[in-house]
Image (cartoon, rainbow, N blue to C red):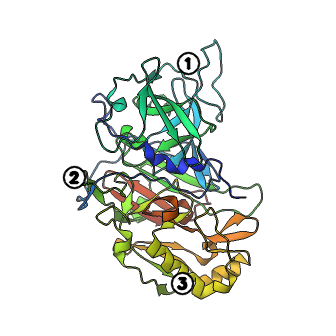
Amino acid sequence: MIPFFLFFFFFFTFFSLSTQHDQNQNNSSLSLSFPLIALHLHPNISSSLNPSLLSPNPRPKTTPSSPYRYKSTFKYSMALIVSLPIGTPPQTQQMVLDTGSQLSWIQCHNKKRTQKVPPPPPTASFNPALSSSFSVLPCTHPICKPRVPDFTLPTSCDQNRLCHYSYFYADGTLAEGNLVREKFTFSRSIITPPLALGCAQDTSETKGILGMNLGRLSFVSQAKISKFSYCVPTRTTRPGSLPTGSFYLGNNPISAGFKYVNLLTFKQTQRMPNLDPLAYTVAMQGIRIGAKKLDIPPSVFRPNPSGSGQTMIDSGSEFTYLVEEAYNKVREEIVRLVGPRLKKGYVYGGMADMCFDGNAIEIGRLIGNMVFEFEKGVEIVVEKERVLTDVGRRVHCIGIGRSDRLGVASNIIGNIHQQNQWVEFDLANRRVGFGKADCSRALV
């Protein structure tokens, strides 16, 4: 049976919002860390469709190092779940780390304040009554009265004249609540200003979202964090055992060895309906399988005049997704190499049809390494031992799906193809860095 719980996490970029930062926010960069865990999600994506125009990437600027650096570890199966201290005093909340989403949200409840009530455990919902820094946003707040085209979250006034939002996710689940402001209290000396986020009161899920994209209301934008990075380990085959990876907010001490690709930037001067201008979009050049470079024009991996074809790095997507022309070329080569071994008539998640029920190690050796090529000679190498991923019931699939089956026209590099390397998002210099590593080991 195809797993679909928490299916909706990958569609949160539809929360795209834009507003001006409060002028009284602290302008210094934060560098923080906190423990993360992970759980298995449906192979879906975070995506948003917004109008913009492709423009040349600005020259990287030199910025001072963040005054703080924090690091922690996380457990990984497929989706990264970060445990964050929110409120005053802090209550630990679990949120999906998602570079494809903008609005962060937590699951809230409305128990009244009682004396000597201990903070809830990490899996519990957030209790606003226990936080002295919690505040709600009224209907008159600019966020609740959008004036920009990338605000796609439906808002309204509730009976208390507070800003209310509601959203239907991909599996039909409804999540709704109020837009609020709350602090992230990492330590006595490191506390963010009050940040705008959603306080969901009607959803079947206890995990929230940590929006990390380029939008003005993402966590990194509001907290003025100039860079962050993570190192995703490979999956373990040992029952009951989850591998451990690493995560940084702020400067990574080994980033000098990273190789960087520039982010493509966009201006809102022309409508491009299939483009997400808030995603971490990079210029992919091609794909190799084994020693063969596939016959795919580089233009397939870049936005066309309608915005179709952009290539984004997304921590909230499990699988990688390709537009039709690229997917068909990959499948054509897989059929040439191991066609008789394909599981006929099988489509995983309605999106991936390169699956096998034979010996995964043997099939991987026949296929060889898979390489995603970027500018400046930067590559993501998926070793032949990791070309196939276990999807359950002794079935293994190439971790690539058709993006058109999701209703999007983008190429998405999912976290399954970000394993065993540092991935750094350098917002100040508008670039993404990669550094090969054994992410299952204790790092720096």
Residue corresponding to mark 2: 269
- Nearest the eye: 277 or 439: 277
Q: Position of residue 16 (x, y in %)?
A: 39, 44
Residue corresponding to mark 1: 129
Q: Quadrant of the N terminus?
A: bottom right
Q: Position of residue 352 (x, y in %)?
A: 59, 68
Mark 2 or mark 3: whose residue is earlier in sequence: 2
Q: Amino acid at mark 3?
A: Glu
Q: Is residue 21 left or right of residue 200?
A: left
Rate crowding at label 2 as few (under 14), some (14 to 19) or many (20 or more) other CA atoms within 10 Å. few
Q: Give the CA distance from mark 1 to mark 2.
A: 44 Å
Q: Position of residue 271 (x, y in %)?
A: 27, 54
Q: Amino acid at mark 1?
A: Ala
- Nearest the eye: 53 or 438: 53
Mark 1 or mark 3: whose residue is earlier in sequence: 1
Q: Give the CA distance from mark 1 to mark 3.
A: 58 Å
- Mark 3 secondary-structure assignment: helix
Q: Nearer the viewer, mark 1 or mark 2?
A: 2
- Count of all numbered marks drawn on residues in the image: 3
Tags 2 and 3 touching, CB below 8 Å: no
Q: Is residue 98 left or right of residue 363?
A: left
Q: Is residue 398 visible?
A: yes
